[in-house]
Amino acid sequence: MSPALDPVAFLPAEVTDELLPPWMAEDRRSRLLALLPAIFAEGEQSSFLARYLLIFETILDEYDRILDNLHAYFAPDLAPEEFLPWLASWIGLTLDEGWPVERRRSVLSRAMDLHRWRGTVRGMREHVELFTGVAPEIVERGSGLTLGHSSRLGHQTVLGRGDRPHHFSVILRVPDPETMDRRRLRVILEAQRPAHTTYALFVLPANDTPGGEP
């Protein structure tokens, strides 16, 4: 090959074989060449063929590295960051791309355990805490206290205010309520609450209390 066509000729003088692409390094041996009939490894053409095959070997080496570490792609703590949304989609989870990668990994690691608690107070509390970093207070509205050992319509006395069945309040106290993404909070609560329930959401400054009864 003439100098005008030799790609090595256009590289800086200090570049050595260690810095060259594999197919440009003169002393790099091709694994694929060794698998071909011996005639291909003889004569002047063997040097060109070896470097030509190294182009494909370099591409295949990358896939070999992926396959050798395939188990890591299914571990939230080890998977590449760009793989996390795909991994989350397998379990019906949507990750917020605005979260730090450490939080996304943490959510993925706990996703299956959280799924077992879906529709419960614990499940809602842990989901909200993962999103906000603050554990919410969840208050379930009771149905009143009955005096006596049995209940009979019109005869027993029930203490308590007007009942609102299957309703609960979520109270979240944060340093700056204005920065809280309430829309995202409601998406989480809608996904985690039992289908027959209703709720009220209070996002308050720390150490504050709701204006009305939760």
Image (spheres, helix red, strand yellow):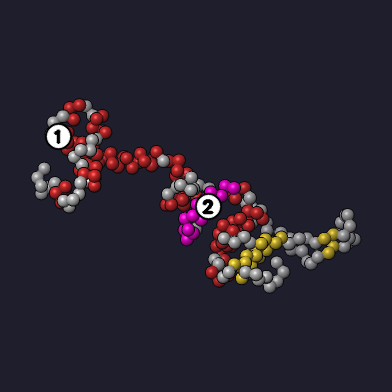
- Relative image position of residue 33 (x, y in whole percent): 23, 32
Please give the residue where the numbered disc 1 appears in the rendered image.
Answer: 45
Q: Residue at x 62, y 69 (%)?
A: 206
Q: Is residue 198 visible?
A: no
- Which-is-in-front pick, marks 1 and 2? 2
Tally of numbered tags: 2
**Residue 36 in the image: above or below residue 6:** above
Quadrant placement of the N terminus:
top left
The residue type indicated by label 1 comes to: Gln
Quadrant placement of the C terminus:
bottom right
Magenta segment, which residues?
97-113
Tell me the number on the disc at residue 106: 2
Q: Residue at x 68, y 58 (%)?
A: 197
How much space separates mark 1 and mark 2, taking CA atoms? 55 Å
Q: Residue at x 49, y 48 (%)?
A: 76
Residue 180 figure quarter:
bottom right
Q: Give the mark, 1 or 2, whose residue is nearer the N terminus.
A: 1
Is residue 42 covered in magenta? no
Nearest the eye: 161 or 49: 49
Mark 1: which secondary structure? Answer: helix
Mark 2: which secondary structure? Answer: helix
Q: Residue at x 31, y 40 (%)?
A: 60
In the picture provided, is 195 more to the left or to the right than 62? right
- Relative image position of residue 59 (x, y in whole percent): 30, 42
The residue type indicated by label 2 comes to: Ser
